[in-house]
Amino acid sequence: MNIHEYQAKQLFADFGVATPKGWAARSTADFDTALANFPEDSAVVVKSQIHAGGRGKGVFTNGYKGGVHVAKTKAEARDVAAAMFGNTLVTKQTGADGRVVQALYFETASSIAKEYYLAILLDRSTARPVVIASTEGGMSIEEVAEKTPEKIVKIHVDPALGLQDYQKRTLGFALGFKGGLLKQFTKFVAGLYNLFWEKDCSMVEVNPLAVTADERLIALDAKVGFDENALFRHPEIVALRDINEEDPKEVEASKHGLSYIALDGNIACLVNGAGLAMSTMDIIKHYGGNPANFLDVGGSASKEAVAAAFNIILSDKNVRGILVNIFGGIMDCDVIAQGIVGAARETGLQLPLVVRLEGNNAAAGKETLAAAALSLVSGDSMADAAQKIVKLVA
Ligand code: ADP
Ligand code: MG
C-alpha cells in the first residue's frame, strides 16, 4: 500500500526526520486555509499529490507543465494550484493515462545547495533491509544505477541488531558529510530506519534529500510503501489509504478476498493458487499470448466470489478471451463451475472461454458446465488450454 507525499512527511516528522513545513488541501475550498499559514511575501512550493513519482517533470493533459512548481508569491501559488487541481498529470511512472490530481501540498520553499538520494528497502535476496544512498539526487536512481553504478552505496542491516552507529557514519562519509552535516545525517537516517522498521514498510525513499544553503539536511520528497501483510498491525496506516489512487478492479477484488493485479495483455485468467496463477501467465506467454491479469481466487472461494472474480476480469476493456485454470485441492471444482455459469449468464458472455478443471470434484464441475450449455472450450491440460485460448484470441 502506498500513501501520499504529505502523509509520508507527517510520518517522517513523527520519527524526527527533518521535512519542510507544509499544508495539504483536498479541495479548492482548502487552498486559502492552507495558504494562510505562509507569510504574505513568501515563496510557496505547490506539489501535486498522486501515488507516482516524476511529478516535477510531468505534464498535465491540459498542457500545463510540471506537477511541482515553486511559486514566488501566494497569489501565484493560488493560480498554480487552480491549474493543477482536478486535472490529469502524466509522468514517467503513471503510464499514458496519467492520474487526476485530487490533492495538493503547499510547502515552504528551501534553497537547495545540493541534492542526494536515500532509501531503505527490503532486499529479498539477503532477507535484510538495505539502505541505499547516492550523491546523485533529484534524478531517477535507475538511471544512476545504469550509468554510474559506482555512485551508489548499499549497506545491509542485520534486522536483529538494527542500523548500527558505524553504518550510519559509513553512509554519511560516502555522501561526503562532515561535522554538523554528518551529525544531522546520522539522526536523519536513524529516524528513517526506525520508521521503516516500526511501521512495516516495504520501502522508504527520499529523493531528493537536500542540503540547504544554510547547511540544513532536509527531505524534500518522501515516498513510503507498506507491506500489506502487516497492515493488520497498523490501523493508523490503513486510515491513510486513498482509494482514488488504486485500480478500481483491484479495490473490488480486495472486497471479495481475491488477489487480483491488472496487467496489459488481453487474455484474462481465473486461477486458484498464486503459484498456479503465475505459471498460467507463463504458459500463456510461452504460446505467444499476453495475460490481462493475475488472479488468484484462493483455496476456498464461494460461488459468489468466483462470480465477482469473473465480473472483475470482464470489466477490463482489453480482454478478448478468458482462461479458467483450476486445480481443485481444497477448492471444489463444482463451486467454480457454478460461479462461472452464474456470471456468464448474468453478463451474457460473448468472449471465447477455455476451461481446464482438474482435481476435487472435477467431474461434477464439468457436468455443471455441460448442463449450462455455455459456448466454451474445455482444455485437457494446462498446455492444451493455453494453446486453445491463445488461438481463439488471435
Ligand atoms: P518528483 O520526484 O515527483 O518529481 P519532488 O518532490 O522530488 O517530486 O520534486 C521535484 C523537484 O522539485 C525536487 O527534485 C526539488 O528540486 C524541487 N522541490 C521539491 N520540493 C521542494 C521544496 N520544498 N523547496 C524547493 N524545491 C523543492
Ligand atoms: Mg522526487
Image (cartoon, grey):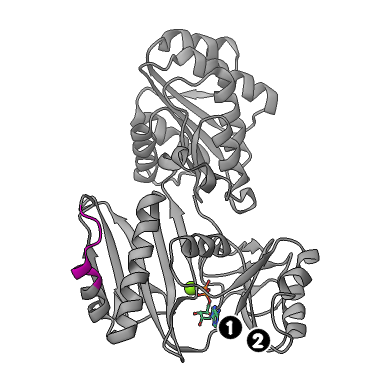
Q: Residues within 10 Å of mark 2 (few under 14, many from 20)?
A: many
Q: Nearer the viewer, residue 315 or 124?
A: 124
Q: Is residue 329 visible to us here?
A: yes
Q: Residues within 10 Å of mark 1 (few under 14, many from 20)?
A: some
Q: Is residue 363 magenta?
A: no
Residue at 44% over, 43% down = 228
Question: In this rendering, is residue 292 above or below 40?
Answer: above
Which label's residue is closer to the chain start, 2 or 1?
2
Question: In this rendering, is residue 160 above or below 92?
Answer: above
Residue at 73% over, 68% down = 85
Q: Nearer the viewer, residue 44 or 329?
A: 44
Q: Is residue 167 magenta?
A: yes
The kind of secondary structure element at disc 1 is loop
In the visual, does 131 lie left or right of 38? left
Identify the residue position indicated by label 2 in the image: 43
In the visual, does 258 lie left or right of 341? left
The kind of secondary structure element at disc 2 is loop
Q: Are marks 2 and 1 in contact (CB under 8 Å)?
A: yes
Give the extent of the magenta segment: 161-168
Image coordinates of residue 381 in percent, x first then y, are 34, 25
Q: Is residue 375 visible to us here?
A: no
Q: Quadrant of residue 7?
A: bottom right
Q: What amino acid does circle 1 point to?
A: Ala
Mark 1 residue CB less than 8 A from any atom of ligand 1: yes
Q: What amino acid does circle 2 point to?
A: Ala
Image coordinates of residue 394 in percent, x first then y, are 50, 44
Numbered label attached to residue 390: none
Q: Quadrant of residue 376?
A: top right
Image coordinates of residue 234 in percent, x first then y, are 47, 43
- Number of marks in picture: 2
Mark 2 residue CB less than 8 A from any atom of ligand 1: no
Identify the residue position indicated by label 1 in the image: 109
